[in-house]
């Protein structure tokens, strides 16, 4: 369903969470990973990465540039607008999801999550993208 | 056989807090570590029964810790233990992954019973976990279906009083009354049988929607804990203090309405409500809860102050103690150094300051009662050594309720004492030397008169 050779951009201001999320991706076979500590650094990574980023997984609540701001910026740039984008939220931030959906997020994951949940969400995201392409 | 013991991981937990739970933790294999980025990234390879987290000394945030721990140990209970109100937002931390957050020493009783439950589950019942049940819910001469235990304070032992296949005989029931037992214990795994038993009894009484006294007290304890931990939370992150104050006040009034003064709280019901009070949970919340009920019921019976205001004062009178370090608040008055006494004796002022900081719009009567609840009629109280006539009537009533609840507090080796006995004891001692009475002797005589009248009427 998804290509594990894809390069994943993991965005979270908490180093430990980046490591844990990275580990979950590794368990699913995604070995090519790039990390960023906030939305601004993520944008920098996105625009300079070689090979290019294939999928973005970002935390919601971050200083400087939040996950939602990053999402809007990505969706507003035609070079990256098509990229799969998953937002990670804490249970306490769930009420904001509607805004993220309106801004074009493909899916969201509520912390804490395990590799099987991540796999499920990734599959749903790729299915959604495939569906849009067919239509 | 340490291999077979359940594993409890402890991160950054100070030894004195672990010591607090030593009885339950003695059944576990404790792996204690300081915080480091690695422990938040790699899970312990073996199954973990429980994770205990202390306040981090590193620059790791609590949110980071709670979320990471939950991701690493998705099926384990994870408790956060803190002695500081700084960054203490119980509900937020629970949403981020901690199973529960214990603010110590206020939460000591709850922490210990939660530990006991965890150890009981981890050892498949080998370690027993008990829950307090109210004896008023147990109708004599009906087969129980659960083992009923008693906690003997004199030697701090638990004994099985009635086995599950037997009824509580009238003889045994009378014996409990004679020895002032108002509550018993049921093991956690048999609680569903207890609730089935009480549901059957309520059904017989055609009270299908009613609550057993045990459930009512559990709900009340949860509500008071939610209320007080909400107040303890550092409010500096909240921008809308007025809305927060209104919400807290609203929660207080809900508790008063639901659990302290209901439609039955008239003059004839006050004594029954007072006599039913026990302090078997021995937590900061049960003290707030009991003082609230006592103050409100004394207010109804004596027609002093407004009962609802007195209930509110009882709920909030000691919130300032959350700012007193545990090593001071846990000591007895005699054990405190002069400097420690000075800190401790400011707690009524801290309670008032916390109410004001949170913009709770409370009547001046309540604020004064809280501020003066440790002033004494003989002039030797604190924080102001205020002479008797200057102390408000409400403050004296609150002080009396506070003293009564302190007297019924269970301690190993101390005989069980009921509220009416505590009232009599305080009145006798104070009235034998009126010049050094802590409360206005006139007020004490009135209280004593009320209780004597109950005795004459046969209610006691």
Image (cartoon, coloured by chain):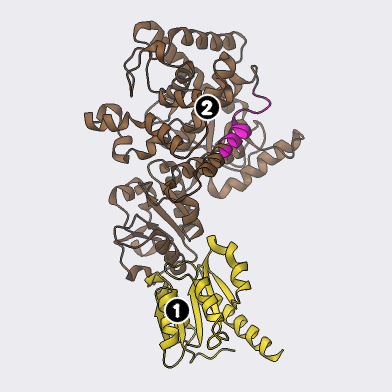
Q: Which residue is mark 2?
A: B363
Q: Is residue A102 above or below residue B253?
A: below
| Residue B193 x, y percent position in the rendering | 63, 46
Q: Colour of chain A?
A: yellow
> Which residue appears at 35% of the width and 52% of the height?
B26
Q: Would you say residue B252 sits in the magenta stretch? A: yes
Identify the subunit bearing mark 2.
B
Q: Quadrant of residue A23?
A: bottom left
Secondary structure mostly seen in magenta is: helix
Q: Which residue is mark 1?
A: A10
Quarter of the image where the N terminus of chain A is located? bottom right
Q: Tell which tag, 1 or 2, sits nearer the viewer.
A: 2
Work out whether residue B176 can be spotted: no
| Residue B39 x, y percent position in the rendering | 34, 68
Q: Is residue A94 above or below residue B159?
A: below
Per the image, label 2 sits on a secondary structure element best described as loop
**How many angstroms separate mark 1 from mark 2 (CA)?**
53 Å
Q: Residues within 10 Å of mark 2 (few under 14, many from 20)?
A: few
Chain identifier, colour brown:
B
Q: Which segment is the magenta one?
A: B250-265
Quarter of the image where the C terminus of chain A is located? bottom right
Q: Would you say residue B155 sits in the magenta stretch? A: no
Please check whether the numbered discs 1 and 2 fall on a single chain: no
């Amino acid at each position: 369903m998804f290509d594990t050779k894809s390069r994943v951009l993991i965005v979270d201001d908490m180093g430990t969470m980046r490591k844990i999320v990275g580990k979950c991706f590794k368990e699913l076979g995604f070995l090519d990973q790039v990390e960023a500590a906030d939305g601004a650094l993520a944008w920098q990574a996105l625009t300079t990465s070689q090979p290019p980023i294939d999928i973005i997984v970002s935390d919601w609540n971050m200083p400087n540039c939040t996950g939602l701001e990053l999402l809007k910026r990505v969706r507003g740039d035609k070079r990256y607008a098509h990229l799969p984008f998953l937002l990670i939220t804490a249970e306490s931030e769930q009420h904001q999801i509607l805004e993220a959906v309106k801004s074009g997020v493909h899916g969201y994951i509520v912390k804490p999550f395990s590799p099987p949940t991540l796999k499920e969400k990734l599959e749903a995201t790729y299915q959604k993208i495939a569906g849009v392409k067919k239509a | 056989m340490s291999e077979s013991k359940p594993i409890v991981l402890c991160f950054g937990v100070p030894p004195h807090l672990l010591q607090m739970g030593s009885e339950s933790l003695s059944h576990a294999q404790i792996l204690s570590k300081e915080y480091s980025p690695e422990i938040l990234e790699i899970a312990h390879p073996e199954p973990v029964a429980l994770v205990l987290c202390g306040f981090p000394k590193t620059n790791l945030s609590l949110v980071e810790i709670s979320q990471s721990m939950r991701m690493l140990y998705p099926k384990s209970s994870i408790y956060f233990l803190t002695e500081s109100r700084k960054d203490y937002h119980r509900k937020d931390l629970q949403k981020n992954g901690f199973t529960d957050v214990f603010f110590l020493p206020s939460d000591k009783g709850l922490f210990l019973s939660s530990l006991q439950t965890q150890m009981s589950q981890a050892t498949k019942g080998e370690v027993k976990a008990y829950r307090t049940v109210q004896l008023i819910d147990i109708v004599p001469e009906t087969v129980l279906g659960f083992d009923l235990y008693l906690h003997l304070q004199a030697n701090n032992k638990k004994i099985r009083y009635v086995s599950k296949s037997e009824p509580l005989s009238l003889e045994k029931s009378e014996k409990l009354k004679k020895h002032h037992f108002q509550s018993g214990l049921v093991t956690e795994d048999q609680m569903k049988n207890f609730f089935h038993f009480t549901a059957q009894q309520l059904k017989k009484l055609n009270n299908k929607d009613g609550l057993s006294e045990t459930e009512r007290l559990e709900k009340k304890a949860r509500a008071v804990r939610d209320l007080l931990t909400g107040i303890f939370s550092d409010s500096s992150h909240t921008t809308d203090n007025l809305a927060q104050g209104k919400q807290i006040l609203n929660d207080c009034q809900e508790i008063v309405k639901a659990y302290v003064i209901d439609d039955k709280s008239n003059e004839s019901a006050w004594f029954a409500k007072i006599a039913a009070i026990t302090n078997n949970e021995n937590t900061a919340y049960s003290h707030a809860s009991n003082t609230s009920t006592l103050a409100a019921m004394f207010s109804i019976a004596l027609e002093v102050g407004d009962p609802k205001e007195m209930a509110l004062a009882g709920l909030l009178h000691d919130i300032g103690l959350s700012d007193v370090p545990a090593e001071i608040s846990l000591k007895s008055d005699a054990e405190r150094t002069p400097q420690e006494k000075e800190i401790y004796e400011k707690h009524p002022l801290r309670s008032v300051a916390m109410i004001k900081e949170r913009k709770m719009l409370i009547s001046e009567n309540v604020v004064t009662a809280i501020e003066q609840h440790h002033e004494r009629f003989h002039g030797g109280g604190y924080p102001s050594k205020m002479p008797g006539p200057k102390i408000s009537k409400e403050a004296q009533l609150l002080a009396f309720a506070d003293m009564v609840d302190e007297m019924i507090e269970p301690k190993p080796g101390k005989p069980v004492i009921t509220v009416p006995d505590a009232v009599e004891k305080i009145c006798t001692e104070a009235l034998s030397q009126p010049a050094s009475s802590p409360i206005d002797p006139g007020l004490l005589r009135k209280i004593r008169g009320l209780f004597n009248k109950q005795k004459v009427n046969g209610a006691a």
